[in-house]
Amino acid sequence: MKQPLILPGLGILKGMAVTARNMIGSYYGRKRLHTISYPEERLALPENSRNFPFLVYDGDDPEGGLRCTACRMCEKECPPQVIYIKPERDENGKLTKHPTVFDIDLNACMSCQICVEVCPFESIKMDSAFEYAAYEHFESLVLHKSDLAKSNTYYHGIKPTEATAVDANLEAERQRKAEAAAKKEAALKAKQAAAAANAAAKETPPTSDTDASD
Amino acid sequence: MNPSATDWPKRSADLSDDGILEISMGPQHPSTHGVFRMNVKLDGETVVWLKPVFGYLHRNHEQLAEKMSYFGSMPYTDRLDYFSSLSNNWAYALSVEKLTGIEVPERAEYLRVLLAELTRLQNHSAFLGFLLGDMGAWGSVLMYAFRERDLILDLFESLTGSRMMCNYMRFGGCRCDLPAGWLAQARKVVDDYPAFLDEMEQLLVGNEILVARTQGVGVLSGADAINGGLTGPMLRASGVDYDIRKVDRYGIYDRFDFQVPLGAHGDTYDRLMVRLLEMRESLKILDAVLREIPEGPILDPKSKSRGLRPPVGEAYARLEAPKGELGFYLISDKSPEPYRYRVRPPSLINLTLLEDMCLGSKIADVMVILGSVDIVLGEVDR
């Protein structure tokens, strides 16, 4: 352990020199003064910055373009249980893969982004907006579907790198699905053709080699 | 080395005396580091009896975790010691990995060491500020410390998205890879940090007032510290060479060359200096990590966080958090929730010897001694 100097008062003077250097230095340059005059001045938030979740919609329709399919995965996994989803049903009681109600209670949301990680449809993402101060808890701090829905353009605006990667993912998924569908269709067609050929072959049993080849 | 149980704690005065004054310090006192209360009996200005009262910030952490999936508890661990959320994340991930046998990729191991050491830097910097605040130097030291800490928090924010509640480690690695330019920014912070530490040393080490307020105050012998189960800088300040990074060599700490600073007297001054020197050692590790960090995956592709059902068994994993040994004890019964989830918080156990350190000192020193323990009530009360 380093022994301090014994000369009385010298340590205090050295300390005062440091304080003076910091005080004067804070008037010149940012090294010793990191503060800014918020809200007049604002720092750009880092791209990964997260605060509360929002729902992404494609295109211009905040209702029809919602990527959310009301699978309720986020509702189930949310540790503080702040998400409430009511899936939409058509007149036959069948799920339409669309939420009628999607609420997030910001009072208890702890910004952990587990909802984002478990979402299989890239539908819920973290917003970086943070100015939510309000006078009461319910009117302004329980966000409904209409408050939560934000466009993909907005998402690209706040998180360009992540949003581009997500778009590429979705595009790849779409292509894979289209390919799979095309394959399935082709397989179905082939099967149908084979079945038809089989049936035709059964209907007219071959009498000779030349007949069968016709 | 073994003090008998009867003379421990070493109470000095007859508590039935009429001149004894019992007062309650806290829980809203600014230097009790949160909502912490002490019942103190005083003979004049001398402390003759002290009882810590805590639990004001209790929020059922362990019970909550037993009602929740393994994955769902990860963000709650951020809120234990909210100054060092990344260390908490790592400790929890470590115990789940031990329970399930998930492997961690090389790059993720480097990232974990990198973030844990940055956490140690910012925790100890804030500690210096708060300790000096407890001594009455409220303002400048804390502001200088917070200024430098802010640069590290900026790094955390641009990587994990949050400054303090990082929620970054996952079972089998880390959540996301470094954004572009992050390593260069980290390199700059690490390179600039020694200048700040030099300045801190110049400001504090030789300061006569600081020396008078801390040397010989709250002395704890090595034997007492071991008996009380203390860990971390508190234990090392009493001269006991015990650092889990060296003892367990968890993660990849065996690859780095660093020393463990030890105190000689076990007083408040040693506790301050041990932390100051520990930051220098952390910088050495950080320098090596930033030089050697390899490319590669950051998450074991076989690991899954959601719907994890570890095999039946139990696991205890621990690591050297900035405040001491942080351990998580888990029992699994193969259901999605842990059967038992237990946290071994360093702050709480370091706090248990508060009375032994305070007996015989003046009332004004109690705050300094409490400050030197470096408690965070989020972790003490859980």
Image (spheres, coloured by chain):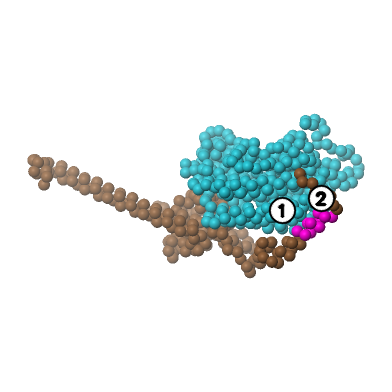
SS class, disc 2:
loop
- Residue positioned 58% across, 34% down in the render: B314
On what subunit does the disc labeled 2 rest? A
Q: A146 and B305: which one is in front? A: B305
Residue at 77 percent of width and 40 percent of height: B264
Chain A drawn colour: brown
Magenta region: A9-18
User: Colour in which chain B is shown?
Assistant: cyan
**Residue B203 placement: quadrant:** bottom right
Q: x, y (%) of residue B333?
A: 54, 35
The reply, left or right, for residue B228 in relation to residue A180 is right
Amino acid marked by disc 1: Asp
| Residue A108: image location, x then y, percent | 60, 54
Can residue A29 be seen?
A: yes
> 10 Å neighbourhood of mark 2: few (<14), some, or many (≥20)?
few
Residue B254 falls left or right of residue B226: left
Residue A204, percent across and down? 12, 43
In the rendered image, which residue does mark 2 sit on? Answer: A5
Residue B73, image x and y in percent? 58, 45
Indicate which disc residue B198 carries.
Answer: 1
Q: Element at badge 1?
A: helix
Is residue B52 visible in the rendered image? The answer is no
Above-or-below relation of A27 to B328? below
Q: Is residue A173 above or below residue B248?
A: below
The extreme bottom residue here reads A40
